[in-house]
Every structure is written in structure tokens, then in C-alpha cells.
Image: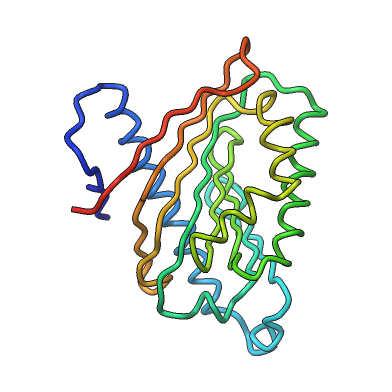
């Protein structure tokens, strides 16, 4: 996998660590996209004819980890054209209140249901990682579709009222899939690093941008 995407020579040690993390995250996101592609090609005729309805799939990964995939626009996903994507990888705090865990779970389920009404959202995947953390991948018809998610009341509630009590850090990746899902090629454009501190209500934020070489 070509992950040599850094646009500039970087000397700061912390930034180099961030870059390596982003490259490892990209491998996970590519795997999730590959899983999505394989499911699309396994759909039977009845499922293909019901393309107007979201198609949920539950994939069992190694060590019993769950991989949830919801396909919203299967015909568009099969097109050989450029897509945008958002990747969300996070680390939970060590001690969590049960009500916070339940609130995050309910919010995720609500957001998945709401996305069916967004014409530019093509799929939503959630992969369970070792340690109980999750990675999310959203495939979009174009980069403008990100605003639909960002402006969603459900997303705003999660970001401003739940995230601080649940997450230790978040890496939010934005990128493109130049040829869609066939073959799976993903290029990072930017990464936002959110770190949550016990004594601060708002997380600290750093952002990195990338180029292709």
C-alpha cells in the first residue's frame, strides 16, 4: 500500500508519530472498504432490486470482533468514479460511566438511521478494534456531503455533549477514493487530532494535511 503521502519534510518528532498513526489507520480503512466492496458483489438479485432501501450487514471478523456495514446507495457504490471518505478512529477513556456508554451507542444507531435520508451518503461501516474501540468509515458521493453529517443535530450532540466523557483521543481522516471501490485506493487529504483533557471542556486540536508523491 502506498502510504507515502506527506507533502513536506517533517522534523518535529510528535508530528512524525502522528503521521505513522495516520498511515496505520489508512490500512484499517482500506480493509473496511475492501469488505464493503466484497459484500456489494455478493448481493443476490432480490437485494439488488431493492436498492432504494438501506442494506445492513453484520460481518464476523477475527477474534469475534464485529464489523457492521450499512449500504445506502449500492448502485452508486458500484460506479467507477471518485468518492470521498471520512474515517474516524478513537480511543476510549479507561473508566466510563454506563450511562455514557449507552448514550454513545444510542447516538450511533440514531445517526445510522438518519443517514438514509442523505442522498450523498453511500455507506457507513463500523469495525470493532482490539480493546473494544471502534473505527468508522463513511463513503460519500462527494466531499460536500460531509457537511450533512457535521450539521446533523445528532452529530452535534455527540461532539459537544458526549465526546468529552467518552473519548481519550480521536483521529478524524478526510480523503478520496479516486477510482471508487474497484480497485480500492484511498488517499488522505487531512487528519484532525482531537485530544480530550480532564481539566478542559473542549479538546485540543491539531491538523495535518497531505499530498501525493
Give the x, y percent position of residue 67.
60, 54
Give the x, y percent position of residue 66.
62, 50
Image position of 136 with respect to 97: above or below: below
> Residue at the spot x=73%, y=67% of the render?
117
| Front residue of this view, candidates 197 and 28 | 197
> Residue at the spot x=75%, y=59% of the render?
114
Pick the quarter of the image with the N terminus: bottom left
Give the x, y percent position of residue 195.
52, 24
> Residue at the spot x=45%, y=50% of the render?
174
| Front residue of this view, candidates 63 and 32 | 32
Image position of 212 with respect to 40: above or below: above
Q: Quadrant of residue 166?
A: top right
User: Among all residues in the image, which is located at the extreme top?
Assistant: 199
Count of numbered marks: 0
Q: How is the image coloured?
A: rainbow
| Front residue of this view, candidates 2 and 114 | 114
Give the x, y percent position of residue 184.
38, 66
> Residue at the spot x=77%, y=22% of the render?
97
Image position of 48 with respect to 67: above or below: below
User: Among all residues in the image, which is located at the extreme right?
Assistant: 99
Q: Residue 206 vs residue 115: left or right?
A: left
Q: Residue 57 vs residue 19: left or right?
A: right
| Front residue of this view, candidates 34 and 147 | 147
Image position of 143 with respect to 39: above or below: above
Q: Quadrant of residue 164?
A: top right
Amino acid at each position: 500500500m502506498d502510504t507515502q503521502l506527506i507533502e513536506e519534510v517533517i522534523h518535529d518528532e510528535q508530528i512524525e508519530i502522528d503521521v505513522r498513526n495516520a498511515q496505520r489507520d489508512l490500512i484499517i480503512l482500506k480493509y473496511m472498504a475492501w469488505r464493503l466492496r466484497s459484500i456489494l458483489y455478493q448481493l443476490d438479485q432480490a437485494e439488488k432490486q431493492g436498492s432504494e432501501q438501506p442494506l445492513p450487514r453484520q460481518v464476523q471478523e477475527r477474534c469475534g470482533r464485529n464489523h457492521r456495514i450499512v449500504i445506502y446507495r449500492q448502485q452508486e457504490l458500484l460506479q467507477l468514479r471518485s468518492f470521498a471518505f471520512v474515517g474516524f478512529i478513537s480511543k476510549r477513556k479507561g473508566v466510563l460511566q454506563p450511562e455514557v456508554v449507552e448514550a454513545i451507542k444510542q447516538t450511533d444507531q440514531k445517526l445510522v438511521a438518519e443517514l438514509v435520508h442523505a442522498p450523498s451518503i453511500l455507506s457507513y461501516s463500523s469495525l470493532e478494534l482490539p480493546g473494544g474501540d471502534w473505527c468508522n468509515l463513511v463513503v460519500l458521493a462527494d466531499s460536500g456531503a460531509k457537511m450533512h453529517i457535521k450539521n446533523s443535530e445528532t452529530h452535534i450532540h455527540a461532539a459537544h455533549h458526549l465526546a468529552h466523557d467518552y473519548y481519550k483521543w480521536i483521529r478524524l481522516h478526510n480523503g478520496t477514493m479516486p477510482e471508487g471501490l474497484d480497485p480500492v485506493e484511498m488517499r488522505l487529504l487531512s487528519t484532525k487530532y482531537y485530544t480530550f483533557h480532564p481539566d478542559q471542556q473542549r479538546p485540543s486540536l491539531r491538523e495535518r494535511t497531505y499530498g501525493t508523491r
